């Protein structure tokens, strides 16, 4: 293989890796090209080790890299073989027809068709077509070459969506001349059952091969794009509409967002810990050097540890949103370790421990079972005040998630105002769109006055922005 | 492509052979990465459980290319002054005291403050010169004329800020000292960083390194390692021992025994003149292999079954 063909392949491989959730920067790509040119493409094992050392940067990535390498290079090795045989074939073609027909004779399927062809001139004609010869020949080379050519004709590298597979298969089959087979099948269907079955069998083989090729192309060229698109779409969809089968993807997405936020805010904290010059300590230190100050000493900035208390309505209408909020909060535990969570619909209880001991999803289910029911804010605020009001201080951020619909009874907003006066920030998240606030039994317009911030929150994107702000504030 | 200036590391096969002659059996993976590190002048970030030979790799590498090994052990609170360089304050102070009189000579006859200062300026910045610089490991590695192996051990124990400090050293092989300027490496050292995965390293650092993860070895490989490190041990005993260690690694232990423990155990058995493993012997020497009381208890409980499975009775 020539060097440029190799590096083209390498670039496709890198695209493939990106699709498999291994982030690779342009600088990494350059490194990979260097590595490949040093190691060459002959020894696959060495190449794999070498590329892994520059492209896979953590253990999960290494596992993914290893799989991806095997998948990618297995297919592309097959293709290389084919390309080699293309050139061989081209040279050997003029005197090769005899060998092909002898090998055809060996194949059992062909012999039935051949026998039938002796009685039927149409069939004999069909037999002469290169496609049928390739299909029924035991030599795989010719067919593989034809499929590769058809793939190139159909511009298969342009595939982007799962749903395009059928379309590309059709294009490739057309390019291969499958129409002739189909016509033959239709003609034979009613008058020659045996030949019909045989032709159908060949068609099936052909379809299988083409489907394989298209699926591989989809995997290499499209999976990554599609994944990105799905993730983006999911971040914008209303959380209440996320279906159960999307939950796994949602979890991954939340984890990824949380990791990003955590690393962004975790770092800033350490930077700002150094305070002003500590004059006495500096002078004391300078005593050893005859009063000449060599080593300044600094005061440490004492900071009260930030704390978040999340109060979630888990009654039917809002439960899903509570689930995502809690999932998010517990995914950023590394930077926000003192999160306490409370759940209510009428009675309120602390659920922090459940999240510490159980996996998040299980904990959420338990919360729903224990505290689900009709909403009563007055009861919830009373319970909360008893439970935790004394723990609220100037470093506490309180987040309340609820739709502020209290079934027309008094929500005891005086208690809410009390919470507000004690904490650093009181944040009310409402999954209803702003237009619906204050309609029907919604107390939202009155609630706004008792919080620092009231926000609409029903998409993952909004949730991300809120948690981002929360982290920035709590470090402030 | 830059030529590697380490003739011992010019091909993957050479490396495998050279390391083996120094008693380090490396997999093709390790050899490939060492080769790339030398050829591309990139640092290697070695990860893996404790005791699989991460530090040993750097030591062996130094022995193979016959260059000094400069080691920087990382810990929490490690800073510039301990890793890069420090000014020799004492020496500076002492010299200023001694040279006080000289100062009078230099300034003798100068009229006015302006002229005095000009004269001082003309003498140059004598107190911030290389002579007053105390090189710490990173700078020391840069200063080795003929090249060196720099081992930055347990980078994950150092603070986050320290990683940023390393970036200049790792990508450009130079150290910037505000008072003097930039000191570039006389000859680019081979750099190994080791990490036990106790925390995630920054992307910036990861990006500059080649990644090498050393897992526990296969049975075959570990047998070769034992044979190379403890050649006096009888072969069938070595085989029993390695298979036993592999079986123990499958248990749910606080700390699984690594290669270093296997070798320690092999040496202990040699000292005890053991010919084969038996229940009593294993019982008596298990504390060489396992470092936690709980782990020993777990293994003791399974001992009979384990020995039967391995057909060591």
Image: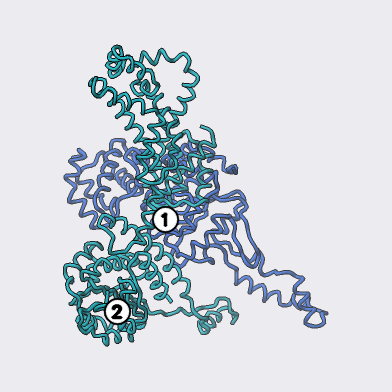
Q: Residue at x 27, y 74 (%)?
A: A402
Badge 1, how many Cα within 10 Å: few under 14, some, many 20+?
Answer: many
Q: Which chain is cyan?
A: A
Callout in the foreground (1, 2)? 2
The circle drawn on residue B195 is 1
User: Is B75 above or below relative to A54?
Assistant: below
In this picture, residue A353 sits left or right of residue B65: left
> In which quadrant of the rendered view does residue B201 lie?
bottom left
CA gap, disc 1 and disc 2: 57 Å
Q: Residue at x 30, y 86 (%)?
A: A417
Q: Is residue B231 visible?
A: no
Query: SS class of the residue under badge 1?
Result: strand
Residue B143 is situated, as x and y percent measured from the top left of the image, at 60, 55
User: Is A80 above or below relative to A464?
Assistant: above
Q: Colour of chain B?
A: blue
Q: Which residue is mark 2?
A: A438
Where is the N terminus of chain B found, in terms of image quarters? Answer: top right
């Amino acid at each position: 293989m020539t060097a440029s063909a190799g590096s083209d392949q390498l670039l496709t491989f890198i695209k493939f890796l990106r699709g498999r959730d291994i982030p690779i920067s342009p600088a990494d790509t350059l490194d990979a090209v260097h590595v490949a040119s040093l190691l060459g493409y002959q020894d696959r094992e060495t190449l794999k080790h070498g590329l892994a050392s520059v492209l896979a940067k953590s253990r999960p990535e290494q596992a993914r890299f290893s799989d991806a390498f095997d998948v990618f290079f297995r297919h592309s090795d097959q293709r290389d073989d084919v390309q080699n045989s293309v050139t061989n074939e081209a040279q050997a073609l003029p005197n090769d027809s005899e060998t092909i027909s002898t090998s055809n004779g060996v194949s059992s399927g062909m012999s039935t068709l051949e026998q039938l062809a002796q009685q039927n001139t149409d069939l004999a004609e069909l037999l002469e077509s290169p496609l049928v010869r390739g299909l029924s020949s035991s030599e795989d080379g010719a067919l593989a070459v034809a499929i590769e050519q058809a793939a190139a004709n159909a511009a298969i590298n342009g595939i982007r969506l799962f749903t395009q597979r059928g379309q590309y298969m059709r294009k490739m089959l057309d390019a291969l001349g499958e129409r002739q087979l189909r016509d033959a099948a239709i003609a034979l269907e009613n008058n020659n059952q045996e030949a019909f079955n045989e032709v159908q069998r060949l068609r099936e083989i052909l379809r299988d091969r083409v489907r394989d090729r298209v699926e591989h192309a989809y995997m290499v060229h499209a999976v990554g794009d599609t994944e990105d698109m799905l993730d983006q779409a999911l971040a914008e969809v209303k959380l209440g509409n996320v279906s159960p089968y999307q939950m796994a993807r949602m979890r991954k997405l939340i984890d990824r967002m949380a990791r990003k936020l955590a690393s962004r805010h975790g770092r800033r904290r350490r930077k700002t810990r150094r305070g002003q010059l500590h004059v006495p300590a500096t002078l004391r230190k300078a005593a050893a050097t005859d009063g000449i100050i060599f080593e300044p000493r600094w005061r440490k900035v004492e900071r009260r540890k930030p704390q978040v208390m999340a109060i979630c309505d888990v009654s039917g209408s809002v439960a899903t949103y509570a689930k995502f909020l809690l999932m998010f909060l517990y995914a950023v535990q590394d930077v926000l370790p003192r999160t306490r969570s409370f759940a209510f619909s009428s009675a309120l209880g602390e659920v922090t421990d459940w999240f510490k001991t159980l996996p998040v999803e299980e904990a959420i289910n338990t919360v729903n079972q224990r505290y689900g029911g009709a909403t009563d804010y007055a009861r919830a605020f009373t319970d909360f005040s008893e439970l935790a009001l004394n723990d609220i201080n100037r470093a506490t951020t309180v987040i309340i998630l609820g739709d502020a619909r209290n079934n027309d009874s008094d929500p005891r907003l005086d208690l809410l105002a009390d919470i507000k006066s004690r904490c650093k920030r009181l944040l009310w998240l409402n999954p209803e769109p702003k237009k619906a606030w204050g309609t029907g039994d919604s107390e939202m317009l009155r609630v706004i006055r008792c919080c620092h911030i009231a926000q609409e929150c029903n998409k993952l994107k909004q949730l991300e922005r809120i948690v981002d702000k929360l982290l920035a504030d709590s470090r402030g | 492509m830059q030529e590697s200036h380490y003739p011992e590391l010019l091909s993957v096969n050479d490396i495998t052979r050279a390391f083996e002659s120094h008693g380090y059996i490396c997999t093709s993976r390790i050899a490939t990465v060492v080769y790339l590190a030398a050829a591309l002048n990139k640092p290697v970030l070695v990860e893996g459980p404790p005791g699989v030979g991460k530090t040993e790799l750097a030591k062996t590498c130094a022995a193979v290319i016959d260059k000094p090994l400069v080691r920087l052990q990382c810990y929490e609170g490690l800073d510039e002054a301990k890793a890069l360089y420090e000014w020799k304050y004492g020496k500076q102070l002492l010299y200023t005291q001694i040279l006080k009189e000289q100062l009078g000579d230099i300034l003798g006859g100068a009229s006015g403050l302006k002229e005095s200062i000009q004269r001082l300026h003309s003498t140059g910045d004598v107190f911030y010169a290389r002579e007053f610089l105390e090189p710490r490991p990173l700078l020391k590695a840069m200063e080795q004329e003929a090249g060196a192996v720099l081992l930055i051990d347990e980078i994950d124990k150092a603070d986050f800020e320290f990683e940023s400090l390393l970036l200049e050293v790792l990508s450009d092989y130079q150290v910037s000292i505000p008072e003097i300027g930039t000191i570039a490496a006389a000859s680019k050292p081979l750099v190994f960083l080791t990490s036990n995965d106790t925390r995630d390293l920054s992307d910036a650092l990861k990006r500059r390194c080649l990644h090498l993860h050393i897992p526990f070895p296969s049975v075959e490989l570990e047998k070769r390692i034992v044979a190379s490190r403890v050649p006096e041990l009888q072969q069938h005993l070595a085989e029993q021992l390695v298979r036993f260690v592999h079986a123990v690694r499958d248990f749910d232990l606080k700390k699984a025994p690594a290669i270093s423990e296997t070798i320690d155990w092999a040496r202990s058995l040699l000292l005890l003149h053991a010919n084969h493993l038996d229940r009593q012997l294993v019982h008596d020497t298990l504390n060489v292999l396992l470092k936690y009381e709980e782990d020993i208890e777990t293994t003791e409980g399974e001992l009979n079954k384990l020995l039967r499975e391995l057909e060591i009775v």
